[in-house]
Image: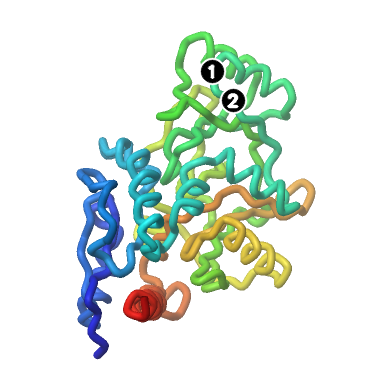
């Protein structure tokens, strides 16, 4: 086995999501250190990092667990690592896309990819103005959401106006949100496409369990006209929750679009979600997720262990980064 002078740093916050990754690294005997993204410090004056490779797994839903400060701290830490020449998996560009839904829509628009009709607001008072340019039903989605948090649906202008006047809408930790037309997915499912090293890895259909789907990356639910924020639930835990998922292969043009998208976002490992609009038949992309949690029970759902392939990739990247450092 190759010897590496510096370990892999795994920068993460969620206590459970990455246990399969740690187990695969342990099985192979690869050196790594866990970095607590919720309680972290670094020296910006240092000129060398202790890590040969860093994996950014900071979650946009961290504020649900009292760790919202980690989201903002991450930008500075990743900038520091990149200045030192450290190879960062899902670095500053990917992280900036992951934590900003408005940026996601702008990236989609720039690539000519369609998404649900939306407006971006930075104050609750502008939500009714945005809604007048859209068709009901619609959803309000906080800009930094993660795991489907902070999404509410409104079926009528009256219900929306009442919620605004009652101060019932929270725009989240950066006080920015999308106002977006609700889209009924054809076939009752959305599709999540996972990518690794810029290439298609697998895809799965995720079927809704209610009469509506709120377009968030991790929530499958029905939301009444009375606003209600949704609890945390990771889409990738769907098999454990009894939600129907099945392996699928998207059309070639969708895979090509997804690969263009992750290349533009500089996402090394991540998930893209889309649906087919039941009214128009159009493919609409609606979420770019650089915090890729592979589906639970993956061997049975997609036929292989994606963590094994992920660690193959990490080992290749660590070897390349080590060789480059030794050559200098």
Q: Between 251 and 38, which is closer to the camera in this rendering? A: 38
Farthest bottom residue in view: 1
Q: Is residue 240 left or right of residue 141?
A: left
Q: Is residue 35 left or right of residue 127?
A: left
Q: Position of residue 55 (x, y in %)?
A: 35, 62
By what rule are the colours in the image chosen?
Answer: rainbow
Q: Position of residue 33 (x, y in %)?
A: 20, 64
> Which residue appears at 33% of the width and 67% of the height?
53
- Residue with the mark numbered 1: 124
> Which residue appears at 49% of the width and 70% of the height?
196
Residue 311 appears in the picture as rendered: no
- Residue with the mark numbered 2: 121
Question: In which quadrant is the N terminus drawn?
Answer: bottom left
Q: Name the quadrant containing residue 310.
A: bottom left
User: Quick one: SS at disc 2?
Assistant: strand
Q: Between 197 and 295, which is closer to the camera in this rendering? A: 197
**CB atoms at circles 2 and 1 under 8 Å apart?**
yes
Q: Position of residue 328 (x, y in %)?
A: 36, 76
Q: Is residue 281 left or right of residue 89?
A: right
């Amino acid at each position: 086995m190759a010897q590496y002078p510096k370990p892999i740093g795994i920068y993460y916050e969620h206590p459970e999501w990455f246990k399969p990754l740690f187990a695969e690294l342990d099985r192979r005997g690869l050196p790594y250190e866990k970095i607590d993204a919720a309680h972290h410090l670094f020296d910006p004056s240092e000129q060398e990092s202790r890590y040969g490779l860093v994996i950014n797994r900071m979650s946009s839903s961290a504020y649900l667990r009292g760790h919202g400060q980690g989201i903002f701290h991450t930008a500075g830490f990743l900038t520091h690592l990149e200045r030192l020449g450290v190879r960062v998996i899902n670095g500053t560009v990917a992280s900036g896309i992951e934590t900003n839904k408005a940026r996601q829509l702008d990236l989609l628009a720039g690539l000519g990819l369609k998404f649900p009709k939306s407006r971006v607001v930075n104050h609750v008072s502008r939500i009714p103005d945005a809604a007048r340019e859209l068709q009901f039903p619609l959803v309000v989605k906080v800009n930094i959401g993660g795991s489907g948090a902070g999404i509410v649906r409104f079926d009528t202008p009256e219900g929306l106006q009442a919620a605004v006047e009652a101060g019932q809408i929270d725009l989240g930790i950066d006080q920015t949100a999308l106002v977006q037309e609700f889209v009924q997915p054809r076939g009752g499912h959305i599709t999540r496409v996972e990518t690794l090293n810029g290439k298609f890895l697998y895809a799965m259909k995720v079927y809704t369990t209610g009469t509506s789907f709120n377009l968030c990356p991790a929530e499958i639910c029905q939301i009444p006209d009375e606003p209600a924020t949704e609890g945390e639930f990771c889409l990738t835990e769907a098999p454990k929750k009894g939600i129907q998922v099945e392996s699928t292969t998207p059309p070639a043009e969708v895979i090509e679009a997804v690969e263009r998208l992750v290349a533009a976002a500089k996402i090394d490992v991540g998930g893209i979600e889309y649906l087919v609009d039941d009214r128009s038949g159009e493919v609409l992309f609606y979420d770019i997720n650089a915090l890729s949690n592979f589906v639970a029970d993956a061997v049975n759902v997609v036929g292989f262990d994606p963590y094994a392939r992920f660690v193959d990739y990490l080992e290749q990247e660590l070897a390349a980064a080590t060789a480059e450092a030794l050559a200098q």
